[in-house]
Image (tube, rainbow, N blue to C red):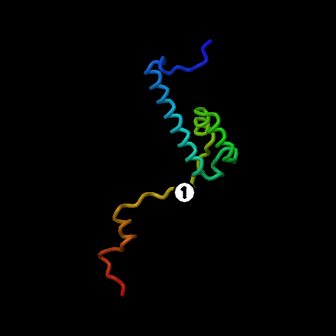
Amino acid sequence: MRTSLDLGATPVGLLVALGIVLVLEIALDVVALVDLVRRPVARVALGNKWIWVAVIVLVNLIGAILYFAIGRKTAPAGEEPAVKPARSAAEIADALYGDPDRPKQP
């Protein structure tokens, strides 16, 4: 009976494929957890973020897929998005340094 694991006998292609799947699984879990943290509780199915943390972490690949498929609620129509639209570089510079065409206040 063979009890030890000999990775040297495993084909290189299989090890590479398993490594890619592992990296993709970890990335998907991280993205799901970040989305869960940023999402308000009112927009999470079941109304409890801790349940979804357990599902994402403990059920591995399927848990993150379940979260993205059924764990997120969409925002009601008419509600403003949480992220404000990006401003142009000129607007940011004006906010930081003031408008160069406007006279300085004494």
Relative to 85, say whether 25 is above or below. above
Residue 77 versus residue 43: which sits nearer the camera?
A: 43
**Residue 73: x %, y % from top left:** 62, 45
Q: Residue at x 62, y 53 (%)?
A: 40
Q: Is residue 47 left or right of residue 36?
A: right
Q: Residue at x 64, y 47 (%)?
A: 44
Q: How many marks?
A: 1
Q: Residue at x 64, y 34 (%)?
A: 59
Residue 54 versus residue 9: which sits nearer the camera?
A: 9
**Residue 13: x %, y % from top left:** 43, 21
Q: Is residue 27 left or right of residue 90?
A: right
Q: Which quarter of the picture shows residue 5?
A: top right
**Residue 76: x %, y % from top left:** 60, 51
Q: Which quarter of the picture shows residue 105?
A: bottom left
Mark 1, Cα crowd under 10 Å, few <14 / some 14-19 / many 20+, is: few
Relative to 42, say whether 4 is above or below. above
Type of residue at label 1? Answer: Glu
Q: Secondary structure at mark 1?
A: loop
**Residue 6: x %, y % from top left:** 52, 19
Q: Quadrant of the N terminus?
A: top right
Q: Which residue is mark 1?
A: 80
The residue positioned farthest toward the top in the image shown: 1
The residue positioned farthest toward the bottom in the image shown: 106
The residue positioned farthest toward the left in the image shown: 101
Relative to 38, say whether 16 is above or below. above
Relative to 53, say whether 60 is above or below. above
Q: Quadrant of the C terminus?
A: bottom left
